Amino acid sequence: MLRVQDLTIRLRHQEQPLVEGVSFAIGRGELFCLVGESGSGKSLTALAIMRILDRGFLPPSGQVWLKGQGGTQDLLTLDEPGMEGVRGDRIGMIFQEPMTSLNPVWTVGQQIMEVLRLHRPELDADAARRRTLEVLGEVQLPDPERRFDEFPHKLSGGQRQRVMIAMALVAEPDLLIADEPTTALDVTIQAEILKLIDRQREKNGMSVLLITHDFGVVAQVGDRVAVMHRGKLVEQGAARTVIRSPGHDYTRQLIRALPENLPPLPPVPGGTRGTLLEVQGLQVHFPVLKGLLRRPVDYIRAVEDVSFDLSAGEVLAVVGESGSGKTTLGRAVLRLIKPTGGSVRYHGQAMETLDRKSLRKVRRHLQVVFQDPASSLNPRLTILTTLTEPMAAHDIGADHDERVERARKVLEQVALPPDTLWRYPHEFSGGQRQRIGIARALVLDPDIIVCDEVTSALDVSVQAEILQILGRLRAERQLALLFITHNMGVVEYLSDRMLVMKDGRMEEIGATAEVIARPKAEYTRRLLSAVPRVADHLGGAAAPGQG
């Protein structure tokens, strides 16, 4: 169906190519996975196939042959009107971030019908609407008739991704390019989207180029896989063969970085592990305001009757789908939002009784690392200022020089060099910015850190580094972590206990190994069954050391 031969991509003012000599082929009905870390050239390869690279790039060289009823054509030599006939009709594409790919001022129905207007002009308005509603039903978007007239901002992340898939599938393309279609989605939604793509493949004989960094997904759905590293393909073959017996060092490195293959975390020293935090019957309700006077007519019960405790050196994972109340729970524990009811006690002291000054003192010991470090770090401040300002605010360190030295030592603990202090956030990668976020929390020497999806959407090797840093700090400092995540592999590796949430309520809580082996709640069983695991689909663990 598609054959890519010696594809090379360059920026206009840069001699070194970003993608060099890439060659692979995808058969009819085949699901071909392209795997690699951020910056490896996966998405650039997809954009070059679609001929939608921006003006900063030179026209790509090589050949991209697409097979069709009229013969085979090289997409790289096709004129623009010819490519307009290919995009959306012969080749559909699901982009990584649906919110930035959907037009915010067009309704869901308008955006999907636009594809039909361009590529199926023989359909009248009624037929186009029927086909649009049909494809929205196929992607299992709830209540298609109502969603047809809604705007993208009213949909959840998983629903927007379904709309993107509907747009890509509505013209029944021969090839679907899916660029990280499940990144940062809940495992249950990810499972549904992967099943959906697979159903469409079987129904229409559609070929799929799936770009991902998740080897669990590759093992679950992939026929063949190619591994990209620094713009080059380093290995390709049958998915099962590559995962079981990787032939290239880089592939072995990626598989070794999976949570199930990481070395054990250092044990927390024995002795007294006193209770740091006690949460009892916590509630957070948000009013629904209506009318001219904006009076509350109802309440959204984001957190309802949640109770747990947290000891020194313990990691409690909070898991659940988007909208389950995980992040709201973390913010309420930190008093970043005021709880509606219940109690949060730190060292036996009820935080709701503290005045502003007393609460500020306590907050030094309760820190947070946010999901997106790029937006939580001030772009105008150097890392030196980012780390020393909180210390000055809490009277830590005798003078500026002592605070600078403390900042250096903390950076060393999170595996960053001392010259990091003099640079700005934009000069760092996502994984490095996440380490800076951890360092900012650590400079205050906290007892507890709330980690809100800190490994979400990170490359598997960067995720491994962050997990091992947190595990080491936990052992060295007796640091307690409230670890909010939807990644069950991370939960199994890092946490002692797990709390499962659904619709703001606790479904169950217990030792991680016990909950995973013998879940009590049906919701927990469904959550665990949706996790794509390499071993489950290969009949045994991958062998990263072989080859």
Image (spheres, grey):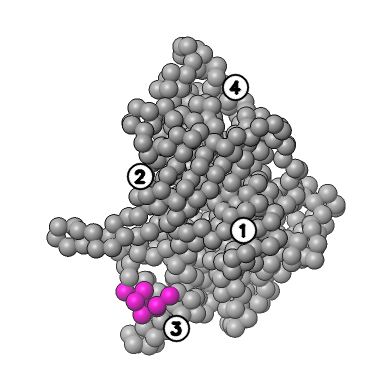
The amino acid pointed to by label 1 is: Thr
Query: Label 2, label 4: how many angstroms apart (C-alpha)?
Result: 34 Å
Q: Earlier in the sequence, mark 3 or mark 4?
A: 3
Query: Label 3, label 4: how many angstroms apart (C-alpha)?
Result: 59 Å
Q: Earlier in the sequence, mark 1 or mark 3?
A: 3
Instruction: Find residue 355 and report its image quarter.
Output: top left
> Where does label 2 land, which residue?
338
> Where does label 3 land, which residue?
134
Q: Earlier in the sequence, mark 1 or mark 4?
A: 1
Tag in front: 3 or 4: 4
Q: Are marks 1 and 3 in contact (CB under 8 Å)?
A: no
Q: Earlier in the sequence, mark 2 or mark 1?
A: 1
Specify start and end residues of the magenta stretch as a single range. Answer: 142-149
- The quarter of the rendered structure image containing the N terminus is bottom right
> In this rendering, is residue 309 above or below 291?
above
Q: Residues within 10 Å of mark 1 (few under 14, many from 20)?
A: many
Residue 101 can be seen in this image: no
- Residue 364 appears at what percent x and percent y? 46, 29
Residue under the image location 45 percent in, 34 percent down: 349
Residue that extends furthest to the front in the rendered view of this protein:
348
Q: Which mark is residue 432?
A: none
